[in-house]
Amino acid sequence: MQTRTLKTAKVKVTTKCNRHCDFCIFADGGQGVNMPLATFETVLDRLNRIPFQQLHINGGEPTVHRDFAQLSNLARERFPDHAMVLGTNAVTLARNTRLLDATLTYYDQVLIGCDDEHGNYDEVVATVPVLRAAGKTVVVNSVLEAVDEAQLTRLAEMCQEHGAIHVTNHVHHIDVGQPANALGGLCDRYLDQHLMIEVDGSCYRCFNAMARYDSEFSVWDDDFAERVFAPRTSHYRFCLKCHEYRDSGQQILPAPAVPARTTIAV
Ligand code: SF4
């Protein structure tokens, strides 16, 4: 039997953020909430039961969680051989030495959103060289709908100089009035790719799905490990609007194996 491995477990440790990007569906600004440490420890316990490649600490802006350093340490101790990835806007990293030190200590990769919406060009330009000098993999991601051309060039040159990766993207995890998809079979794009874990421990198995509506199970379920790899039998609510829908032609994913034909001797 083929063993399945999850690529990324993404844990949203907070919905608080120090920025107010129009296109963001993942944060609630200053009104957000932090994942309690007890919940985070349960998340780590559950993840310890499944094969996965990388642990991605995300938000909101994860560094504004008051226990950011502590929970990062807990995760690193529990999973010393997994890649630890931080998703951040780098604003606090440029201004707070303690948070930068925690990032340098516990993380292997840092993914940074940087564009007009984030309003963080100067902070990113200040932080990336420090992360790269410490040997971290750094990816800077700019949303093309919200980036100044001159700043885009500045970012690209800075990334090239310091060996960071600069990528551009379109906003896709948002309903901007696009026509609904004609949904056929289930989308196969995110099978075994991203398990999203919300601040309350609820889970869904696609980066694009809508957090509040598409939860499939939670870290409080005793059969969490089975649920992560359980067959998917229905679309997520957001599939209707998702730019990334790719029809697998299947109503169940992964498709049930076709039983081998048995020949009966007569
Ligand atoms: S259509 Fe979009 S939301 Fe639905 S599974 Fe595919 S990538 Fe995820």
Image: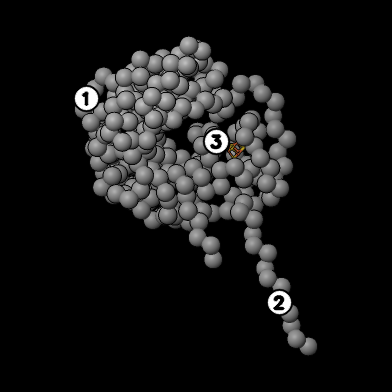
Residue 16 can be seen in this image? no
Q: Is residue 115 above or below residue 248?
A: above
Residues tagged 1 and 3 counted as in contact (Cβ below 8 A): no
Residue located beneath label 1 in the image: 97
Residue 209 numbered tag: 3
Characterize the local packing of mark 2: few (<14), some (14-19) or many (20 or more) Cα atoms within 10 angstroms.
Answer: few
Mark 3 secondary-structure assignment: loop
Label whose residue precedes the other's in the sequence (2 or 3): 3
At 35% from the left and 41% from the top, the residue drawn is 84
Amino acid on which disc 1 is placed? Thr
Residue 74 picture quarter? top left
Residues tagged 2 and 3 counted as in contact (Cβ below 8 A): no
- Disc 1: residue Cβ within 8 A of ligand 1's nearest atom: no
- Disc 3: residue Cβ within 8 A of ligand 1's nearest atom: yes
Residue 262 numbered tag: 2
Label whose residue precedes the other's in the sequence (1 or 2): 1
